[in-house]
Image (spheres, grey):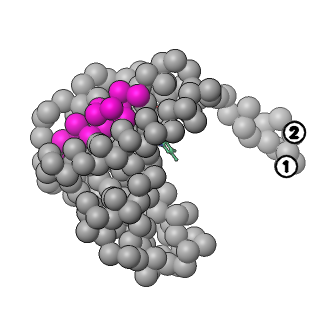
């Protein structure tokens, strides 16, 4: 069995993939992990749309590009390092939608009260990302395309009570990324009261 800490400490945002197909069994296993996440009142208010169709992926890619070029880039640029800007840029301009599989993760308001809908879906997305890493797949949590929620609704035939929250590409990495850069725990953890060092 893959060590959990090897997986969680190496999970990264992948935005470049090979064309190698991802078998349905692998996608099913990854999504099964997603469905084992916690949710408010165990309502499990998620829906996963698995997209392989190149035309549909291209349409989602167009929305992503439009969101990036129509304000996303300008909004993020002042805070991103040049390397991260370049990564997100190539992802938004086709890297993400070129993944052999896109999983559009949705929240279903008919299963869950609005106040905790999103908080009930993000743990499933994290499980999905970790399961993808454990399966040797690259993945990334992306939200740019959801800026055009109504267009996504049309493209995916989402009913009114189902809202797209994220687009997660799945594919075999074009190049393996190094370990994630994260702050030391002592920068973010406190003992007993805020400000007391861990
Ligand atoms: C709420 C959220 C939204 C994100 N949206 C996007 C996005 O639209 N496009 C993208 O390329 N990456 C997106 N990301 C991925 C982040 O850029 C990435 O997780 C972060 O830079 C850490 O990357 P690393 O794990 O490779 O170090 C998003 C991540 C989160 C948590």
Coordinates of residue 152 in the picture (x, y in percent): 33, 59
The residue singled out by tag 1 in the image is 192
Which region of the structure is painted magenta? 89-101
* Residue 138 visible (yes or no): no
Classed neighbour count for the residue bearing mark 1: other residues with Cα under 10 Å, few (<14), some (14–19), many (≥20): few
Between the residue at mark 1 and the residue at mark 2, the CA separation in whole angstroms equals 7 Å
Say if the magenta span includes residue 167: no
At x 48%, y 18%, the residue is 83
Q: Is residue 91 magenta?
A: yes
Asked if disc 2 is less than 8 Å from ligand 1, the answer is: no
Residue that appears at 38% across and 41% down: 66
Residue at the front extreme of this rendering: 70
Q: Is residue 127 above or below residue 76?
A: below
Give coordinates of residue 59: x percent, y percent: 24, 48
The answer to whether residue 86 shows anywhere in this view is yes
Seen in the picture, residue 146 relative to 2 is either above or below; the reply is below
Q: Position of residue 10 (x, y in %)?
A: 43, 32
- Describe residue 188's horizontal placement relative to residue 113 as left or right: right
Mark 2 — residue? 196
SS for callout 1: loop
> Quick one: quadrant of the C terminus?
top right
Residue 111: quadrant of the picture: bottom left
Residue at horizontal 12 percent and vertical 40 percent from the top: 21
**Residue situated in front as seen by the camera: 83 or 22:** 83
Q: Nearer the viewer, residue 152 or 102?
A: 152
Query: Would you say the residues marked 1 and 2 are in contact, meaning their CB atoms lie under 8 Å apart?
Result: yes
Judge whether 42 appears above or below 12 on screen.
below
- Which label was assigned to residue 8? none
Q: Looking at the image, which is closer to me, 71 or 145?
A: 71
89 with respect to 187 (left or right): left
Q: Residue at x 58, y 36 (%)?
A: 75
């Amino acid at each position: 069995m893959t060590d959990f800490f090897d997986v969680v400490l190496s999970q990264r945002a992948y935005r470049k993939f090979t064309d190698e197909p991802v078998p349905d069994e692998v996608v099913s296993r990854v999504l099964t992990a997603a469905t084992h996440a916690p949710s408010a009142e165990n309502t499990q208010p998620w829906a996963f749309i698995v997209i392989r169709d190149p035309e549909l992926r291209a349409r989602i890619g167009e929305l992503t590009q439009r969101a990036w070029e129509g304000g996303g880039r300008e909004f993020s640029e002042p805070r991103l390092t040049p390397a991260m800007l370049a990564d997100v840029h190539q992802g938004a301009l086709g890297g993400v939608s070129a993944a052999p599989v896109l999983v559009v993760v949705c929240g279903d308001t008919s299963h869950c009260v609005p106040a905790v809908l999103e908080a009930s879906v993000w743990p499933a997305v994290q499980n999905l990302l970790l399961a993808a890493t454990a399966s040797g797949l690259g993945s990334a949590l992306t939200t740019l395309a959801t800026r055009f929620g109504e267009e996504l609704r049309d493209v995916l035939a989402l009913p009114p009570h189902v809202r797209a929250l994220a687009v997660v590409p799945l594919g075999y990495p074009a190049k393996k990324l190094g370990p994630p850069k994260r702050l030391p725990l002592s920068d973010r953890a406190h003992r007993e009261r805020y400000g007391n060092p861990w």
